[in-house]
Amino acid sequence: MPRILLVEDNEMNRDMLSRRLIRNGYEVSVAMDGQQGADKALSEQHDLILMDLSLPVIDGWEATRRIKANDATRRIPIIALTAHAMAGDREKAMEVGCEDYETKPIEMSRLLGKIAALLKPTAG
């Protein structure tokens, strides 16, 4: 069962996403801020990370930079999640190391397709 780290500070979003991911066959670990997300990426094994960009302690941009700068975690695909989509955010997310980008409110079928596509090369 693929493991997903969900880094999301909004309790309602976190609960909804984790329930729907579990229902779709994923094991979910959660972090409530960017620092906790970066720490969990290092201390636990994950196949993919869903990273909110607007987070307390350290934001999702910096948490992603830290994860991608570490040899132990740099290969974990990260999908950026944001409610405040601004011009250039997608490009900025790719520059810091995200493999994909999804705006909120989350369209679950599209997100599941992106997750499946990113996990496919390593599934086995």
Image (cartoon, helix red, strand yellow):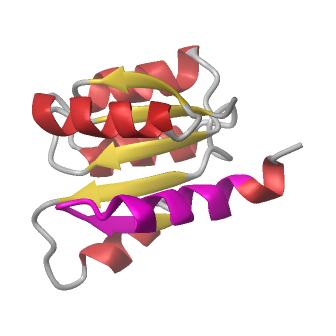
* Residue 70 horizontal/vertical position (percent): 59, 36
Residue 47 quadrant: top right
Residue 110 percent across, percent down from the top left: 43, 68
Q: Residue at x 38, y 39 (%)?
A: 20
- The reply, left or right, for residue 19 in relation to residue 66 is left
- Left or right side of 103 for 122: right
Residue 106 included in the magenta stretch of the image: yes
Q: Is residue 12 above or below residue 104?
A: above
Q: Is residue 108 above or below residue 32?
A: below
Q: Residue at x 47, y 31 (%)?
A: 22
Q: Which residue is depicted at the point 24% across and 37% down? A: 16
> Main structural element of the magenta stretch: helix, strand or loop?
helix
Determine the image quadrant of residue 33: top left
User: Quick one: quadrant of the C terminus?
Assistant: top right
Q: Nearer the viewer, residue 100 or 60?
A: 100
Residue 63 place in picture, x, y as percent: 35, 40
**Is any part of residue 57 visible from this angle?**
yes
**What residue range appears in magenta?**
101-119
Placement of 47 over or under 110, stated as above or below = above
Quarter of the rendering containing residue 73: top right
Q: Position of residue 57 (x, y in %)?
A: 15, 28
Question: Please, which residue is most extreme toward the top here?
Answer: 43
Q: Is residue 56 visible?
A: no
Residue 109 or residue 63, whichever sits in front: 109
Q: Residue furthest front?
A: 23
